Amino acid sequence: MAMLEIRDLCVNYGMIKALKGISFDVNEGEVIALIGANGAGKTTTLHTITGILSAKSGSVKFEGKELTKTPAHKIVRMGMAHVPEGRRIFQQLTVLDNLKLGAFTRNDAAGIAEDMEKIYGRFPRLAERKTQIAGTLSGGEQQMLAMGRALMSRPKLIVMDEPSMGLSPILVSEIFDIITSIRKDGTTVLLVEQNAKKALSIADRAYVLETGNITLSGKASDLINDEKVRKAYLGE
Amino acid sequence: MGFLDNLINGISLGSIYAVIALGYTLVYGIAKMLNFAHGDVIMVGGYLIFTCATTWGLNPYLSLVIAMAGCTVLGILIEKIAYKPLRQATSLSVLITAIGVSYFLQNIALLIFGANPVTFTSIVNLPKISLFDGQIIIKSETTAAIVVSVLIVVGLSLFVGKTKSGRAMLAVSEDKDAAQLMGVNVNRTISLTFAIGSGLAAVAGGLLCSAYPVLSNTTGAMPGIKAFVAAVFGGIGSIPGAMIGGILIGVIEILGRAYISPQLADAIVFAVLIIVLMVKPTGILGKKISEKV
Ligand SMILES: Nc1ncnc2c1ncn2[C@@H]1O[C@H](COP(=O)(O)OP(=O)(O)OP(=O)(O)O)[C@@H](O)[C@H]1O
Ligand SMILES: [Mg+2]
């Protein structure tokens, strides 16, 4: 059984059909890339998985439990964290308060302190800026904070929505290195990206989403050489 | 009445406005709505204290605690029944509903307690303070209003800044969806906000009626509006802003009444608000409303 199982998932915005019955799996320990053009439905997929949006039909199962009727705030407790599109950090709060909010579901003070140190180790720039108001961080720092905040819940599965968006090439590489190291620590990753090349280079498997349908799937190393993928998403 | 007397009275009235303004500011900051029924919850608090203390002869402080509990429950119910179904509605629909709730509470009170105002017996039982050989006497109600409002502002700031529930309130205030992704129960957080605001309204009702002992079904309306002005004045959404705004409005009102014109005092309050908003649209301590990405 896969860790995350999506079956025939349909999601509408009013009359607009954003997802038209998609199915895919994420196995424990994998990095899965979900790629697709603007408006394909990537963000909609992630929002439905973590409970921000509700499905019209179909199912989302996490470790065997149905999530489509579960409210977002309970899904976090089951071990899933979401790094949202556009980061969505709490701009008016400090870096430290953002990280504390990431650990909102936990009550183990010692474990929280330990994870906080780990995150400061992984993102030294956040450590230097603990007491800074998050809205004044640079774009790259905000992305690191959004990732650190998600990790503070000690998730089994972390879903990320375009973590490289709007960052300089050096920072993009840094973010992808971090994703690889998150996976090494045993956290499963579902990664939505516009930067298909980078995403395919670190993923195990990938799915291609086109206007609400999954049109291609397979091993990332195969897709990266696929004629259609190269044309449509790798700009070749 | 010397200037100092007037100033002290203004600060005292302003402290009561501040406690009411906190209710407006909390609910606006977190639920993003103007709860125009807030003033009427004060009136309900007043009647609850009156019924317990005067009609039933209970201890005044116990009566206050009962009124706080009653208003807390009322606030939670108002939110659940009237506002929660409108979470996705336009702010105009919510505003109209809030005005409806306001009239509903006023008319229920009219039905139960009748149209004749009742005389409220002060629940404050402290010694008077006499200064300058008795030239200035500070009434116990005045002292109580100032002390209680300061305690509330300090307590509330600590609660919001230092506790987990407080941090959840700040998160919901900034971004509901992101707060949910942290595991924050948004509905419960909004409920908590209404509970706190309404519990404070009962305290404000006790202070207001003790200082101005005439209680009727419209007692909460005007102080409610002025406290709303105070909240906007101080910067809506800001806890210290509510305190500063409340005290300024109280002082302006009392000084305006004493030195300019008793009839124009309320008009002066609103005129000052308009001027402040022209100079600084977000109020004295208001933050810029951050743009959503
Ligand atoms: N709140 C909304 N109301 C109506 N339609 C929406 C809403 N959000 C998204 N859509 C529509 O649903 C479709 C899928 O949008 P979605 O945001 O999931 O795309 P995406 O793949 O994440 O795109 P991008 O790469 O630009 O982030 C689009 O056609 C979009 O216009
Ligand atoms: Mg998107």
Image (tube, coloured by chain):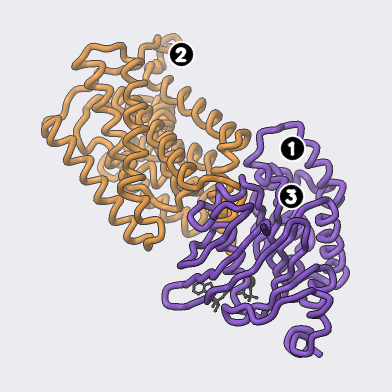
* 3 or 1: tag closer to the N-terminus: 1
Could you say which chain is coloured purple in the image? A
Give the chain of mark 1: A
- Badges 3 and 2, same chain: no
Which residue is more in the foreground, B168 or B260? Answer: B168
Q: What shade does chain B have?
A: orange
Q: In the rendering, at what x and y percent does residue A83 appear?
A: 68, 59
Give the chain of mark 3: A
Residue under numbered circle 3: A151
Give the chain of mark 2: B
The C terminus of chain A is located in which quarter? bottom right
Quadrant in the picture for residue A160: bottom right
Q: Residues within 10 Å of mark 2 (few under 14, many from 20)?
A: few
Q: Does the residue labelled 3 lie within 8 Å of ligand 2?
A: no
Left or right of A176: which side holds A162? Answer: left
Q: How far apart are marks 2 and 1 (CA)?
A: 54 Å
Judged from the image, the quadrant occupied by ligand 1 is bottom right
Q: In the rendering, at what x and y percent does residue B181 appear?
A: 60, 52
Q: Residue B131 carries which label?
A: 2
Residue furthest out toward the front: A1
Which residue is more in the foreground, A111 or B132? Answer: A111
Write the residue at 66% across / 48% down: A79
Left or right of A24: which side holds A74? Answer: left
Q: What residue type is labelled 2?
A: Leu
Residue B43 visible here: yes
Residue under numbered circle 1: A112
Write the residue at 73% across / 70% down: A33
Query: Could you say whether the residue bearing mark 1 is in a helix, strand or loop?
Result: helix
Quadrant in the picture for residue A87: bottom right
